[in-house]
Image (cartoon, grey):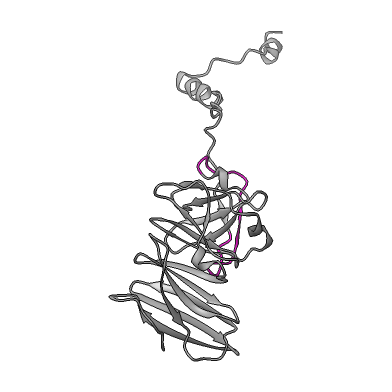
């Protein structure tokens, strides 16, 4: 009788002290994260091949500093900043993908919604941008209320814009005009115009600035050539074929 009573007794023997402490630690509830303290998922970015080609910014969750740029189209700059444009309302901002810093810009004009082709670059004085219909400038010091057209470049069909050493280098590869226009970044007058070298009409051409050198890459009929000129100590007036 006592044997059956011992077997059917539901009360287990007490655990040793060290096992009891371990059991309590394992069964202790895990505190849930406070609201808003959840770790953001890592951002996913499609990097564009060229500075003017768009890249989709796709993310499920981003940090609070990058939240305004969710679902934007990104246009990169060699100076670290990226121009983020919301295709729904053309809201624009500067985004630093490595630090998460965001600088709000005024919305772009409505005609920027007609194409994804956009050329732009950043300078300490402001941002220059074009979608093929003239040039716009946003002054950042002091901050302007809106983008302003550059009257001297109203007919410019810019395919690339680069900033270096206090000047913007605006390249046009239009059939009627194929040249590089140098614009002062502070006061915005035209400082010089550099024609392209005597080559066949390029199928594609692009300007790049590296230090004191200005590079023009030209592609025509399957062949690629390059030309360089110096940006100092004086403004260049021609390219030298490499």
User: x and y percent of residue 32 in the render?
Assistant: 56, 28
User: x and y percent of residue 24 in the render?
Assistant: 52, 21
- Image quarter in which the C terminus is found: bottom left
Taking the view exactly as shown, the residue that stands out farthest to the front is 151
Taking the view exactly as shown, the residue that stands out farthest to the top is 1
* Residue range highlighted in magenta: 46-65
Q: Is residue 57 magenta?
A: yes
Task: Give the vertical position of 106 relative to 195 (above or below).
Answer: above
Q: Main secondary structure of the magenta part?
A: loop
Q: Nearer the viewer, residue 26 or 151?
A: 151
Q: Nearer the viewer, residue 148 or 93?
A: 148
Task: Give the vertical position of 37 relative to 174 (above or below).
Answer: above
User: x and y percent of residue 186 in the render?
Assistant: 38, 59
Q: Nearer the viewer, residue 234 or 51?
A: 234
Q: Residue at x 63, y 59 (%)?
A: 112
Q: Nearer the viewer, residue 116 or 62?
A: 116
Quick check: 183 left or right of 157? left
Q: Is residue 1 magenta?
A: no
Quadrant of residue 10 within the rendered picture: top right
Total number of numbered discs in the rendering: 0
Taking the view exactly as shown, the residue that stands out farthest to the left is 233
- Image quarter in which the N terminus is found: top right
């Amino acid at each position: 009788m006592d044997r059956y009573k011992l077997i059917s007794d539901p009360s287990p023997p007490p655990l040793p002290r060290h096992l009891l402490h371990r059991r309590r630690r394992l069964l202790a509830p895990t505190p849930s994260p406070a609201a808003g303290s959840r770790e953001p998922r890592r951002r996913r970015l499609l990097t564009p091949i060229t500075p003017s080609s768009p890249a989709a910014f796709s993310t499920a969750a981003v940090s609070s500093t990058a939240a305004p740029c969710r679902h934007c189209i990104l246009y990169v700059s060699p100076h670290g900043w990226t121009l983020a444009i919301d295709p729904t309302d053309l809201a624009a901002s500067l985004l630093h993908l490595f630090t998460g810093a965001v600088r709000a810009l005024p919305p772009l004009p409505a005609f920027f919604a007609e194409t994804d082709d956009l050329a732009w670059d950043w300078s300490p004085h402001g941002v220059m941008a074009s979608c093929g219909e003239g040039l716009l400038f946003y002054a950042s010091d002091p901050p302007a209320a809106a983008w302003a057209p550059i009257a001297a470049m109203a007919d410019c069909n810019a395919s690339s814009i680069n900033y270096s050493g206090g000047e913007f280098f605006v390249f046009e590869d239009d059939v009627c005009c194929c040249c590089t226009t140098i614009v002062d970044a502070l006061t915005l007058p035209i400082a010089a115009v550099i024609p392209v070298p005597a080559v066949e009409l390029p199928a594609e051409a692009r300007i790049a600035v590296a230090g004191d050198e200005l590079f023009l890459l030209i592609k025509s009929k399957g062949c690629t050539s390059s030309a360089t000129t110096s940006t100092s100590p004086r403004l260049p007036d021609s390219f030298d074929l490499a």
